[in-house]
Image (tube, rainbow, N blue to C red):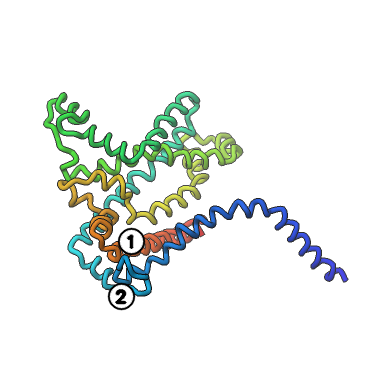
Amino acid sequence: MASKTSKPTRNSSLKRQIKRSIPYYMLLILPLVYLFIFHYMPMWGLQIAFRDFQSQTSVFQMPWRGLHYFQQFFSSSLFWQNFRNTVAIAAYSLVAGFPLPIILAICLNECRQLKFKKTVQMITYMPYFITTVVLVSMILQFTARETGVVNNLIALLGGNRVDFMARTQYFRHIFVWTGIWQSMGFNAIIYLAALSGISPDLIDAAKVDGCNKWRRIWHVDIPGIMPTIIVLLILNISSLVNVGFERIFLMQNPFNLSVSEVLSTYIWRVGISGGNYSFAAAAGLFNNVISFSLIVIANFTARRVSETSLW
């Protein structure tokens, strides 16, 4: 008799919970519609990577070419050069740029001068709001051979002026470190938020045990933000082949093209600008498959070596 009454009670309780949650479900409608329209519906167009694109023809009526455009992409004389450039710039950015926001966040967290802390945080956070076009314009102005601040300082110290943007050996350093300068403050905020979530009891216990500041950072702060570090590292690894298009495209010129041409700019030049949309779709699909594979591998590795992963 009790079992017969418990089932209707559970059902009525579930109905009440759903009824109370209706406003929250309604809030999800617009994001889900946006996700469907702009992220799932375009997947229908992936077919053109396997077909000969014709603008006035339905997708199903386009001639089937199979893996022709993938073979064309891989057999291109510039493919491996551009792939190496992409991986080199992305790996350089990851190795040089990933630890710095963590270090900055820990330093700000340990700072007891409130005004100084807020000033440093504001100064490092402000570059994030500079648009890509303005940032590249600043880089070109500062590194200009005749009028740039950097070359004026070099000439003042008795050195020879250098055309930085025309020298291939300088391009990657300029691209990576200006990107780090722009994003370091914003990324540090994420780690500061994670540091603020560490229990004060752990910090007090470390002080009672006689830990100095460095040992407290190593044994309390870093383990406390390790889940955040791992998740962001996985996300950064997944974007190794997706170097930002806008900034690198604006910084390119005929002199540094051998080291600045990456897969995204190559796809634009050959596929989009050249009107070869099937080739562009095939190359873009290759990029996405590589990114998906990297995030799966990174997530699997993180799950094996730690207790934190994306799924």
Amino acid type of the residue that numbered disc 2 sits on in the rendered structure? Pro
Circle 1 is placed at which residue position?
Answer: 284
Residue 227 located left or right of residue 165: right
Looking at the rendered image, the disc whose residue lies closer to the viewer, 1 or 2, is: 2
Residue 63 badge: 2
What separation in Å lies between label 1 and label 2 (alpha carbons)? 20 Å
Residue 289 at what x, y percent from top left? 37, 64
Give the total number of marks visible in the rendering. Answer: 2
- Closer to us: 33 or 248: 33
Going by the numbered disc 1, the residue's amino acid type is Gly
Q: Position of residue 108 (x, y in %)?
A: 46, 32
Answer with left or right where residue 220 lies relative to residue 275. Answer: right
The residue shown at (35%, 44%) is 97
Q: Are marks 1 and 2 in contact (CB under 8 Å)?
A: no
Task: Identify which residue is drawn at 83% across, 70% down.
Answer: 3
Residue 133: x and y in percent read 31, 40
Q: Quadrant of residue 153?
A: top left
Q: Residues within 10 Å of mark 1 (few under 14, many from 20)?
A: many
Q: Would you place residue 53 above or below residue 29 in this image?
A: below
Task: Please identify the residue farthest to the right as the structure is shown.
Answer: 1
Q: Which mark is residue 94?
A: none
